[in-house]
Image (cartoon, grey):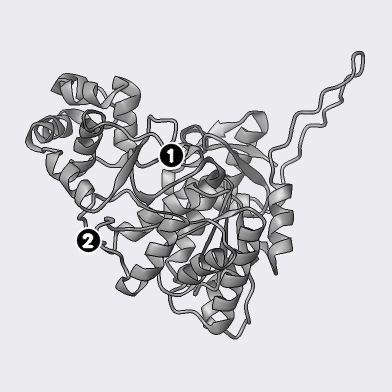
C-alpha cells in the first residue's frame, strides 16, 4: 500500500479539518485547482468562482485555511496507528471514487487490497431477532467463501454478525465507522475490531479523535454502499437507519437486495416494504451470487459486416406521474445525470431523487457509472 509522506498528507488533512468543508465542496475545489496545495493558496476571488460558493463563504474558507494546523492530526494518527488513503492516489478504493461525494481522506487501520473491490455490504437493524442474526451470519460466511469481501458498519446486531460470518469463513471484511478510529464504537466491539483489522480494515472519514455523533451515521452509510458492488438488507424495521444505506446504494447505482421476514414481525417491516417497492428478494447465498452475475457489466454486441440492427423506439411505461414521465422521456433520448434531469423535469432535487429511486426499484430506469441514468 502506498503511504504518503507527511508533506503530501498535510494539505489534505488541513482541508479535512475545516468545518463546513464537506466532501462535495472539497471535490469541486480539487476539480478546479487540481491539487490541495493550490486550493490552500487560492485567493478569495478565485475561491468564490466555485459554483454556489459565493464571496462570503469563500472569505470564511480563506480565513479557515490560515487558522488550522494539520500537525496535531498527524500526531494523533501516529499515536493510534492510523494510516490514510488520499482521493488522488491509486490505492484509494476505485468503487468509492465513483460516488458523488467520496471522502477526500479515508483513515484506516489494517489494509485494503485490490481484491476488496469485489465486495458486498450487509447491513440491518441493531435491534434484531435471532432469525436476522442467523441470516446475516450465513450470508456473510457464504459470500466470503465465494471470494467476496464483506463490508458493514460494526454496529450492534446485524452488522456485527456480518463481520463475524466473514471472519468464520476465513474471509476479508471491512468495517466503516462513523467516528474517528482512536476509539471503537460500540465499545463492546473493540475485540471484534481487532480481528477485522487482521483480516481487512476499519475505515472512517472522520478525524482521528472525533467522537461519533448521530448525524454522522447517515453519511457513514454512503461509504458502506460506495465500497460495495451490492447491498443486502437483513431485517430492518420501518424506520431503521439501515434503510438510509439502501437509498445511498440506489443513488450510487448499486443493486439493493433484501431478506424477507415474517409479515407479523416489526423487525422485518422495513425490508419487506423495500421488497414491495422493488428491492430484489433473496433467500440464500445462491440467490445473491445469481443477482451479482446478472448485474455484471454487459458488453456491446458487435454486428457482422453488412448486417444492420432495427431499433424499436421504447414506449412510455404505464402508471407514471407527470414528473416521472418527464424523467423517462429525457432518458429515452439519451443518458442524463441528476442535474440534467432536474432541469428537464422542472422539479427540485429532493423530488427528482425520490422519483429516480422509485423508478429504479421498479426496473424502469437504471444507474450507470458516474451517477448517470438510462432507461432499462
- On screen, 18 above or below 256? above
Determine the secondary structure under disc 1.
loop
Horizontal and vertical percent for residue 5?
26, 31
Q: Is disc 1 surrounded by few (<14), some (14 to 19) or many (20+) residues within 10 Å? A: some
Q: In the drawing, what numbered circle is on residue 250?
A: none
Q: Quadrant of residue 312?
A: top right
Horizontal and vertical percent for residue 367?
59, 41
What residue do we see at 10% from left, 38% from top?
A: 68
Q: In the drawing, what numbered circle is on residue 211?
A: 2
Determine the secondary structure under disc 2.
loop
Q: Is residue 124 visible?
A: no
Q: In the drawing, what numbered circle is on residue 100?
A: 1
Horizontal and vertical percent for residue 72?
13, 44
Q: Quadrant of the N terminus?
A: top left
Q: Is disc 2 surrounded by few (<14), some (14 to 19) or many (20+) residues within 10 Å? A: some
What residue do we see at 26% from left, 27% from top?
A: 36
Q: Earlier in the sequence, mark 1 or mark 2?
A: 1
Residue 179 is left or right of residue 143, and the answer is: left
Q: In front here: 152 or 251?
A: 152
Q: Quadrant of the C terminus?
A: top right
Horizontal and vertical percent for residue 140?
59, 64
Q: In front here: 98 or 319?
A: 98
Report the Cα–Cα distance between label 1 and label 2.
25 Å
Q: Is residue 203 visible?
A: yes
For the view shown, which residue lies furthest in the bottom direction? 264
Residue 45 is left or right of residue 154, and the answer is: left
Total numbered badges shown on the rendered structure: 2
Q: Nearer the viewer, mark 1 or mark 2?
A: 2
Amino acid at each position: 500500500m502506498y503511504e504518503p509522506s507527511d508533506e503530501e498528507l498535510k494539505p489534505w488533512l488541513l482541508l479535512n479539518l475545516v468545518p463546513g468543508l464537506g466532501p462535495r465542496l472539497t471535490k469541486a475545489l480539487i476539480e478546479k485547482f487540481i491539487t490541495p496545495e493550490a486550493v490552500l493558496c487560492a485567493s478569495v476571488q478565485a475561491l468564490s468562482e466555485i459554483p454556489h460558493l459565493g464571496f462570503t463563504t469563500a472569505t470564511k474558507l480563506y480565513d479557515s485555511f490560515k487558522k488550522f494546523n494539520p500537525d496535531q492530526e498527524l500526531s494523533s494518527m501516529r499515536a493510534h496507528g492510523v494510516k490514510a488513503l488520499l482521493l488522488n492516489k491509486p490505492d484509494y478504493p476505485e468503487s468509492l471514487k465513483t460516488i458523488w461525494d467520496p471522502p477526500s481522506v479515508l483513515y484506516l487501520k489494517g489494509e485494503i487490497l485490490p481484491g476488496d473491490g469485489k465486495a458486498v455490504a450487509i447491513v440491518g437493524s441493531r435491534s434484531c431477532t435471532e432469525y436476522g442474526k442467523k441470516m446475516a451470519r450465513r450470508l456473510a460466511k457464504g459470500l466470503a467463501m465465494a471470494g467476496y469481501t464483506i463490508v458493514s458498519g460494526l454496529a450492534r446486531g446485524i452488522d456485527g454478525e456480518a463481520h463475524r460470518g466473514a471472519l468464520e469463513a476465513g474471509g476479508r471484511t471491512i468495517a466503516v465507522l462513523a467516528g474517528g478510529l482512536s476509539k471503537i464504537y460500540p465499545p463492546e466491539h473493540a475485540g471484534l475490531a481487532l480481528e477485522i483489522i487482521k483480516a481487512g480494515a476499519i475505515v472512517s472519514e472522520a478525524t482521528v479523535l472525533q467522537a461519533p455523533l448521530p448525524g454522522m451515521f447517515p453519511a457513514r452509510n454512503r461509504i458502506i454502499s460506495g465500497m460495495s458492488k451490492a447491498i443486502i438488507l437483513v431485517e430492518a424495521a420501518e424506520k431503521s437507519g439501515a434503510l438510509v444505506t439502501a437509498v445511498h446504494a440506489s443513488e450510487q447505482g448499486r443493486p439493493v437486495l433484501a431478506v424477507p421476514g415474517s409479515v407479523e414481525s416489526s423487525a422485518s417491516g422495513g425490508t419487506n416494504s423495500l421488497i414491495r417497492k422493488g428491492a430484489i428478494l433473496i433467500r440464500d447465498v445462491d440467490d445473491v451470487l445469481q443477482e451479482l452475475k446478472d448485474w455484471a457489466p454487459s458488453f456491446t454486441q458487435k454486428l457482422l459486416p453488412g448486417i444492420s440492427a432495427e431499433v424499436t423506439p421504447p414506449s412510455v411505461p404505464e402508471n407514471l406521474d407527470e414528473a416521472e414521465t418527464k424523467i423517462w422521456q429525457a432518458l429515452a433520448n439519451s443518458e442524463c445525470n441528476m442535474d440534467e434531469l432536474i432541469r428537464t423535469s422542472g422539479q427540485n432535487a429532493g423530488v427528482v431523487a425520490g422519483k429516480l429511486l422509485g423508478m429504479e426499484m421498479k426496473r424502469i430506469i437504471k444507474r450507470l457509472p458516474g451517477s448517470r441514468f438510462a432507461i432499462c
